Amino acid sequence: MGSNEQRPVPPVTEIKAFRAGIVRWFARNQREYPWRKTRDPFKVLVAEIMLRRTKSEQVKPVYEAIVSQYPDCDRMAEAEDEKLGEILYPLGLRWRSPAFKHMARELKAAYECKVPETRAELTSLPGVGDYVAGAVLSTAYGKPEWIVDSNVVRVFKRYFGVPTSKEGRRDKHIIEMAKMYVSCHDPRKANLAILDFAALICTPKDPKHDSCPVKAGCKFVLAERRIDDPAARA
């Protein structure tokens, strides 16, 4: 990497400043979802598995139906396949129906229905990867555990100007940035804040620059201004 190129990982001070701006914005603009109103690790785990590759608004009614029918690990482990499939049907992705039951049964057999508090143990459960594990640990248990999906990659890439691969969520420097980002006194709030910021402001198309609370330090915004302003390019 040449001396004039962007460093793979920004200084921790820049990441802290970015996080502070996002969290302040989140305090006034956070989205409301039923799974955010509980700290029950099992219900949070169920929600996060549902949210994989599915929009939050689609998940909301299905989540409410499933936690009403199966509010804990014991009941989900004994769920009838047909009934569980009917509830989950609107989400598509058929793998999720058996995955929930397998997850609940493994949770019951290996952990006596207590959702584990480590990433390694959580990712040993069917249907649980690094993102779901990090989300459960930070939002249910309040642990400083990182989350990285395409939305987090997009925000980091734009704001800090860091390069990413096609599989950015697997990039070591992106994961390291996520770890630095969530190292704070309220990891739950920090992770929810960046998700809402990505959904409402730093959208895949037509990001809302005028409403962005951290645009002053955003490399993406600064680059666009240079393109639009001939004097800035001189």
Image (cartoon, helix red, strand yellow):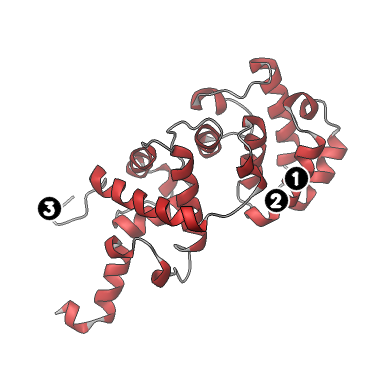
Tell me if residue 75 can be seen. yes
Q: Residue at the spot x=61%, y=27% of the render?
A: 125
Report the amino acid beneath label 1.
Glu
In the figure, 213 relative to 93: above or below? below
Q: From the viewer's perspective, tell me whether residue 223 is left or right of residue 144.
A: left
Label 2 environment density (alpha carbons within 10 Å; few <14, some 14–19, many ≥20): some
Marks 3/2: CA–CA distance:
48 Å
Q: Secondary structure at mark 1?
A: helix
Neighbor class of circle 3 (other Cα within 10 Å; few <14, some 14-19, many 20+) is: few
Please name whichever residue, 23 or 203, is drawn nearer the observer in this view of the structure.
23
Q: Position of residue 100 (x, y in %)?
A: 72, 34
- The residue indicated by pointer 3 is 3
* Residue at 47% over, 50% down: 193
- Contact check, label 1 and label 2, Cβ < 8 Å: yes
Residue type, label 2: Lys
Answer whether labels 1 and 3 touch (C-beta < 8 Å): no
* Residue ID for mark 2: 60
Residue corresponding to mark 1: 64
Q: Comparing marks 1 and 3, which lies closer to the viewer? A: 1
> Residue 75's spot in the image, x, y percent?
80, 27
The quarter of the picture where residue 57 lies is bottom right
Q: What is the secondary structure assignment of the residue under circle 3? A: loop
